[in-house]
Amino acid sequence: MAGIIDRPRFGCALGGALGLLRAIPRAVPILHAPAGCGYSVYIGLNAGAGYYGGGYCGSTSAPSSNVVEKEAVFGGEERLREQIASTMEIMDGDLYVVLSSCMVEMIGDDIRSAARIFPGVLATPTPSFHGNSYHGYDLMLETLIRDYVPEQAGKKPRSVNVIGLVPGQDAFYKGNLREIKRLLALIGLKANTLIGEGESLEDIRRSAESELTLNLSDVYGSLSAEAFKEKHGIPWLRAPLPVGYLQTEKFLLTVGEYFGLDREMIDQALQREREVYFDYLERISDSYNDLDFQRYGLVVADANYAPAVTAFVAEELGWLPRLTVVTDPLTGEQRARLDSRFETFEPSIKPEVRYDGNASAVRRHLADTWERNRNQKYYEALSPLIVIGSYFEKDLAEQLKCSYLPLSFPVNSRVIFNRAYAGLSGGLTLAEDLFGAIIPGR
């Protein structure tokens, strides 16, 4: 029997597509949807992504066909064509993309045919029954790769496209991409992150020049990676988001091996980074030991962050991750891929892993994995504990009287600008935020 999802941690496919377009300067979405549909999506995305903002042409500025009962009965393609024409006349943009909602897809409107009349206008069907916002990101990026990026005869040596971080769903995506670009440059690779700092539509159009597509996710971005391969002949490699030194070392060695780079050169780059990284991390060592900063950990996050953050707190901070809850709806193959990430943990610190998107279920999973106090003479409490999750875990942390850090969508209780948790600088930032979360409770 199908169940319900209590407080979902993602939006619909339309939200994922809007989140990606918001990350692209001078991109204008054109919504073929009922009135208020796009704004409702924006409200959730804005606050949930650390107050993401509407961008160049989002929020209440986003053009919409605002279809009503008439279009539901007789079809809305004529209304859409009218909206596209008026948008291109009034809104100053470099890219126009039509996105659809559930209602217009259910009545059979063909948004691609309507968009094709206008040169350069793209269209991506994004009803909720096509998938969630992670999938909407992939659908939108795939459309750009197939229909917007021109083919290139040659490839630039050691150039890499970077995909797999979903703008909005990952509130730290831009800072993370900045760090990934820096890390790849250490070993002589030029990264095109498509939507990173200072990048524009021109960077997206030049992406066909790259030699490799690097997917930073075990789950997301596969459609787009395959589009690069099929349309532009660019192979792709999966190298999940690294957090901290140990994961970064593995990340750079994996990418370096693909390009046949000299191992000694990579080791030298890592040596320089390691000296800086651990010099900073060493600052907390005295207090860690003297004031007992070790913690049990409960990690509740999406498929990108859950294994990376769990490994970071276990392997680099020496904490004990008792339970990790992966909050995305995944296929059996995707779960197996994530399960393999947890198989590398030492048995003594390997967490219980559960897959469940229901916010109310986290407490139940925690109870199932830790024996309750039944007035035993001796009882090992799950304390001190830190909850690393989303805004939805705030109440749970308060009930458990433990520390708490939100980093996974929705992140309503923080404003996020250029903060990053990826790589080496991101690992230091995450360690700083985690210790900063436990110190006020002392």
Image (cartoon, grey):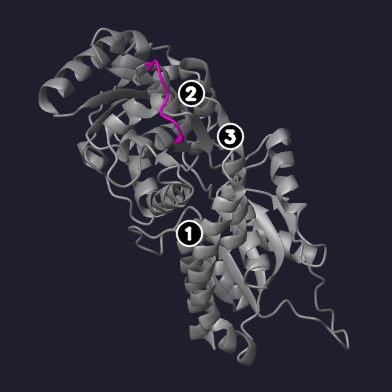
The disc at residue 228 is 2
- The alpha-carbon separation of the residues under discs 3 and 1 comes to 21 Å
Q: In the rendered structure, does residue 2 fall within the stretch colored magenta? A: no
How many C-alpha atoms fall within 10 Å of the one at disc 1: few (<14), some, or many (≥20)?
Answer: many
- Amino acid, disc 2: Phe
Residue picked out by circle 1: 421
How many C-alpha atoms fall within 10 Å of the one at disc 2: few (<14), some, or many (≥20)?
Answer: many
Q: Is residue 427 left or right of residue 376?
A: left
| Mark 2 or mark 3: whose residue is earlier in sequence | 2
- The alpha-carbon separation of the residues under discs 2 and 3 comes to 12 Å
Residue picked out by circle 3: 237
Q: Are marks 1 and 2 in contact (CB under 8 Å)?
A: no
How many C-alpha atoms fall within 10 Å of the one at disc 3: few (<14), some, or many (≥20)?
Answer: some
Q: Is residue 322 left or right of residue 14?
A: right
Say which residue appears at 66% left-offset and 69% top-offset: 297
| Residue range highlighted in magenta | 151-159
Secondary structure category for the residue under label 3? strand
Task: Give whichever of 381, 176 is nearer the camera.
Answer: 176
| Residue 103, image x, y percentages | 41, 22
Q: In the rendered structure, does residue 154 fall within the stretch colored magenta? A: yes
Say which residue appears at 67% left-offset and 72% top-offset: 319
